Image (cartoon, rainbow, N blue to C red):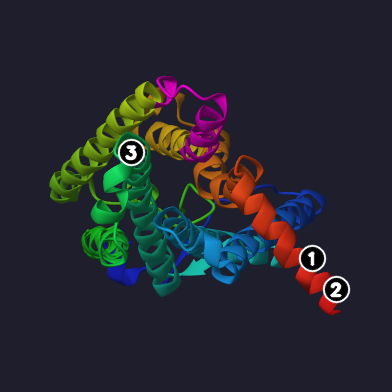
Amino acid sequence: MSNGSSITQFLLLAFADTRQLQLLHFWLFLGIYLAALLGNGLIITTIACDHRLHTPMYFFLINLSVLDLGSISTTLPKCMANSLWDTRAISYGGCAAQLFFFAFLVVAEFSLLTVMAYDRYVAICHPLHYGTLLGSRTCVHMAAAAWGSGFLNALLHTANTFSIPLCQGNAVGQFFCEIPQILKLSCSQSYLRKVGLIVVSCFLAFACFVFILFSYVQIFWAVLRIPFEQGRHKAFSTCLPHLAVVSLFVSTAMFSDLKPPSISSPPLDLVVAVLYSVVPPAVNPLLYSMRNQEVKDALKKVLHSVVFQH
């Protein structure tokens, strides 16, 4: 295969070779997928139905749940179908679409997590200016900027990735199409075309990460000065879930992209990819509902109304 135009399909990395393990992976991922759909669906429904949660923080949380639903729906269904039908194939167009949507949703989610850090910073460090700095129009603009940055990033990366000649076959070393694995199939002399865009993306991601860290240093300093224990508990209950989500998301994604080739192996790549692409969408609803009393109360109210209506 001399270039990408001669490739009609890619071969994804299988989780197992035996039929029994393939079916086990199918049922396991089906359970995770349904849990993610249910959890994020409940978050969206609860916030939409309870007017007390119509605040900037929960507006961003709805956006996060939508992004989580989109990202896990981009990777898991195809993986489950391949395990169920004992195949590894994905079409060239399907691979490009999967890479585009995953890059779009992941970058948009990281951008949104940065916005959510700013929201918590203003709410706790400058509560008197919260309504002014985070009005409804400002929140919509910030959410749109997060989605727009993800779309633009994915468009540039997808166009650049699939314009590079592929000379190393069509076997992708991952259970879904992602940029680093496609680049491994490229001709060595063509890889330099991609370096500049990668450097810019890493710099922007690092800048967001530094902003998040700076915001939380300020937040925890302000929380520790709150004289009432109840006030500190409420502040921590809204901030700790967000910090846990950011930590899991950033640490696993950075490890996947920056780990040295000497420790890279298919099993390790699979585990790390599951940690940053599958686990966060499934556990985010639990993190936000278990640590947030307002969400738990609203969720009980919604479930109570649904049960007694039937």
Residue lying at 82% horizontally and 79% vertically, measured from the top left? 309
Given residues 173 and 214, the one toward you in this image is 214
Provide the major secondary structure of the magenta segment: helix
Q: Which residues are magenta?
A: 223-242
Question: Does the CB distance between marks 1 and 3 fall below 8 Å?
Answer: no
Q: Amino acid at mark 1?
A: His
Across and down, in percent, residue 198 comes to: 21, 45
Given residues 88 and 195, the one toward you in this image is 195
Q: Amino acid at mark 3?
A: Tyr
Single out the residue that lies furthest toward the bottom: 310
Split into 4 quadrants, where in the image is the C terminus? bottom right
Residue named by callout 1: 304
Q: From the viewer's perspective, is 116 left or right of 38?
A: left
Q: Is residue 239 above or below residue 85?
A: above
Secondary structure found at label 3: helix
Residue lying at 29% horizontally and 61% vertically, measured from the top left? 135
Residue named by callout 2: 308
Mark pair 1, 3: CA separation: 34 Å
Residue lying at 64% horizontally and 57% vertically, measured from the top left? 36
Residue 272 part of the magenta segment? no
Q: Amino acid at mark 2?
A: Phe
Given residues 16 and 64, the one toward you in this image is 64
Q: From the viewer's perspective, is 154 left or right of 57?
A: left
